Image (cartoon, helix red, strand yellow):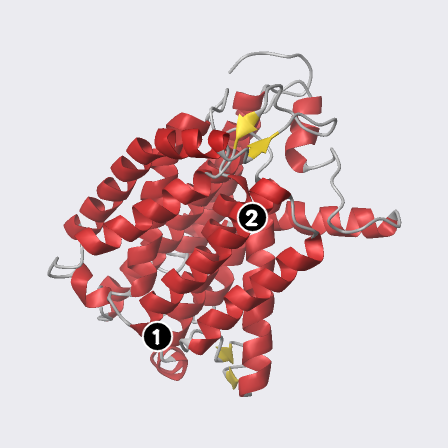
Amino acid sequence: MREYLLTLVIAAALTYMLTPLIRNLALRNKAVAHVRDRDIHTETTPRWGGVAMWVSMAITLVMVNSLELVGKAYSRELLGIFLAATFVLFLGMLDDRFELDAVTKLAGQGLAAGILLLFGIQILWLPIDGIIVLPTNIGQLLTVLVVIVIINAVNFVDGLDGLAAGIVAISAASFFGFSYLLAVENGFSRAGAPSLVTAIVIGTCIGFLPHNIHPARIFMGDSGSMFLGLVLAAAAITLMGQIDANAVFSENIGPAALPLLLPFAVLAIPLFDFLSAVFRRIRRGRSPFAPDKEHLHHKLMSWGNTQERTSVILYFLTATLALPAMLSAFIPLWGAIIVGCVLLFLTALLTNRKTKVGI
């Protein structure tokens, strides 16, 4: 655990130090978010925050390679995750600068998922009525679909200062806790690509937040949201592939479904926002990727919550779903439910429905 904590701290420090440099680079290259009718920010703000995250990840991976435990996590899967993340980062950089159309971005996200497939990262089985081993083509198609959905879920929730970075940090922390505790409880290797990359994601989000909280001096942009979404999706699929599902069920070690279901639980808020936006726009005869001002954070702000309060409410709501889902694999279900109820109560206390108040 100490080595993972060191990895997290290194990634956070690097991201914090590099972000101002990337901010200046974005300004020089006009990779900025201008103020539009649907936007909440009131000043032109540079993007490309994802570049600082990617550079930090790359440097961190070089620096921790020689650590005794973490060094064992370096594998073909880790290389595949890094290369796919690099591809989707450059796609996001182009979108941040030139505003690519939705079809181009979807095609690029599919190609990034294809890179994962080339490195053997794909969904192999599903926990349906026991274990169903998927045909290769079905597993590959499902992998691409899961990756694209999670990427766009993170992308859609990136609508307030600090919102996406905070939600992803909480989600990654829950997923890291699950993958690490699973290894500790059941004798699996603690040195795995899922634990390493999620530790780095937590660090990059923490290091980025001081520059991104309201009023944001830089946005992560699509370069950041797509990068983070892909890494989370890839970590989940990789962990699932490392578990012998038949052994899990036969020995009653734990819920074999969680490696696949946990990302959807910890990202429930972004996923709900994404799916509701898609259905809402299709119902109105619009493109599912046409922007509007009816996202969950818009609704919370319409109740009188400030940007800061809205972000914190959604942080707590994410934790309300993510933490119990993670804990349910290791403690009695009633304990996980109690944790969820306490967090839900705190979320309700934070939520303002009438008057505008500061946080």
Q: Nearer the viewer, residue 264 or 30?
A: 30
Indicate which disc residue 242 carries: 1
Report x, y in % for residue 157.
59, 41
Left or right: 20 with respect to 191? Answer: right
Left or right: 296 with respect to 60? Answer: right
Is residue 255 among what the camera can see?
no
Quarter residue 79 falls in = bottom left
Indicate which disc residue 312 carries: none
Q: Amino acid at mark 1?
A: Gln
Q: Nearer the viewer, residue 234 or 246?
A: 234
The residue that mark 2 highlights is 94
| Secondary structure under the numbered disc 2 in the rendered image | helix
Residue at 12% x, 57% y is 67
Residue at 10% x, 61% y is 68
Q: Amino acid at mark 2?
A: Leu
Report x, y in % for residue 285.
89, 50
Residue at 47% x, 24% y is 217
| Secondary structure under the numbered disc 1 in the rendered image | helix
Question: Which of the marked residues, 2 or 1, is nearer the chain's N terminus?
Answer: 2
Q: Is residue 138 above or below residue 355?
A: below
Report x, y in % for residue 170.
42, 43
Residue at 69% x, 22% y is 303
Q: How many angstroms separate mark 2 from mark 1 (CA)?
A: 34 Å
Q: Is residue 134 above or below residue 119?
A: below
Q: Residue furthest front?
A: 28
Count every numbered label the image shows and give the total: 2
